Image (tube, grey):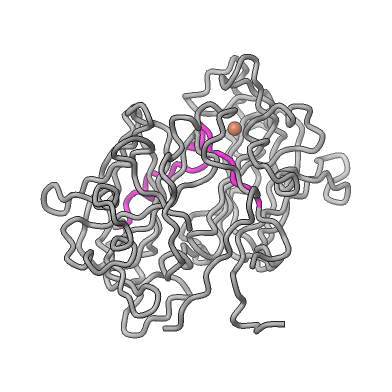
Amino acid sequence: MAGKLIATPGQTVGPFFALGLDRPEWADLTRQSPQGQRIVIAGQVRDGDGAPVPDAVIELWQANAAGRYDHVEDTQAGKPIDPQFHGYGRAATDAQGRFKITTIKPGPVPGRGNALQAPHINVAFFARGLLRQLHTRIYFADEPANTGDPLLSSIEDEGVRKTLLARPEGAGIYRFDFVLQGNDETAFLDL
Amino acid sequence: MAEPPAYARHRPDTQPPYLYPDYASTVKRSPTRPLIRFEHTLSEITGPSFASGWAGAAATDLTRQHKGEPLGERIIVTGRILDEDGRPVPHTLVELWQCNAAGRYHHPVDQHDAPLDPNFTGAGQAITDGEGRYRFITIKPGAYPWRNSPNAWRPAHLHFGVFGGGFVTRLITQMYFPGDPLLPYDPIYQSTADAAARTRLIAAYDPDLSEPEWALGYAFDMVLRGREATPFEGRD
Ligand SMILES: [Fe+3]
């Protein structure tokens, strides 16, 4: 049950968020040389007309290469914290709606019950025209652990499930598009 | 590891919808498929920590970022970041951006025919203290026109971003000023159906926060999602 105060409503980031939120260095989560396989995730954001969205900001939260979050409530035994990896990143889209993130591939993390979650990156997505954030996840299409992942397995429509998979496009390069409406509409989460 | 306690879902109508046609840009940018409901795991209840200072130095006085002082009404904006149970959120990042007193952003996309102020950028950041408190000194932003509908004007506002304890507590919002005559006409403000929730977006003028002969004081608390259960305190 929710508490005694009402939470503050979200309001759009608007078109000028770069003034406060643009930290180009935060798009590179490897800037402190963490452990793990270096990867690049690049893609485009498109709206309901298929037009590029030049004013979106993508925020990432992920575990380190061992599958440990840098957070006080992650008390997993036997998975070390990487002092060179905080796990948070942010990238804004350019005039063509494109973004690029450099990071390391996260390890698997526990789910509810005894489930194991396949490696994934958590996303909070903001844009002009969005009154509050959308949540989704980036999984990796070439990851064998996907078959046992609770979220992916819960999505029956294969076309929808595929929208959560970053496609390998060469060594360590992945493609992930955010499609806000239409046939390839990204699966967004109610968290 | 024990099952982590989830964050509480928002009460109905206390957050804006994704599709709100009065705000025209939502029409082509809001999802059309139902969102997939997913119960929180470690991925959702953890989130970035800022206590170590990695996000950079605090910038809480927006009136002293240039050679001269910016034009406009000097204001102090201060408050606490709380969860829905009223517990303060310490050591979290608060980001602020805004236009100048004339209603113009220091941003290339802003073509509003109002002057830029060479002494005002309009960006700041703070880390909350142990009691969840933040404090900025800035100038009151102006209203500005936008193309949502003919002759539409945004009420004066500050843009705020806050993190909180988990990735799902992330909040980006706007703070408005009490008594602004534009609020009834602003679809972004009006998009939240619940009146009590909407009122959370309006700062309170507080004479005790004003500093004599110098600046007007406004109080603005931001409330983030709380926990479903409070495992460390038991039930009452
Ligand atoms: Fe604005």
Residue B23 horizontal/vertical position (percent): 57, 29
The reply to whether residue B131 is visible in this rendering is no
Residue B197 horizontal/vertical position (percent): 71, 49
Q: Quarter of the picture for ligand 1?
A: top right
Residue B42 horizontal/vertical position (percent): 42, 70
Above or below residue A188? Residue A144 is below
The residue depicted at 48 percent of the width and 30 percent of the height is B27
Picture quarter with the C terminus of chain B:
bottom right
Extreme residue toward the front, this view: A156
Q: In this view, does B205 lie to the left or right of B118?
A: right
> In the image shown, does B17 or B118 lie closer to the viewer?
B17
Tally of numbered tags:
0
Above or below residue B106? Residue A167 is below
Q: Give the range drawn in magenta.
A: A8-29
The residue depicted at 41 percent of the width and 54 percent of the height is B36
> In the image shown, does A29 or B143 lie closer to the viewer?
B143
Q: Give the image quarter of residue B165.
A: bottom right
In magenta segment, residue B147:
no
Q: Is residue A174 left or right of residue A4?
A: left
Magenta residues, dominant SS class: loop
The residue depicted at 39 percent of the width and 59 percent of the height is A61
The residue depicted at 81 percent of the width and 41 percent of the height is B216
Picture quarter with the N terminus of chain B:
bottom left
Q: Is residue B182 left or right of residue A82?
A: right
Q: Give the image quarter of residue A63.
A: bottom left
The reply to whether residue B140 is visible in this rendering is yes
Residue B219 horizontal/vertical position (percent): 77, 49
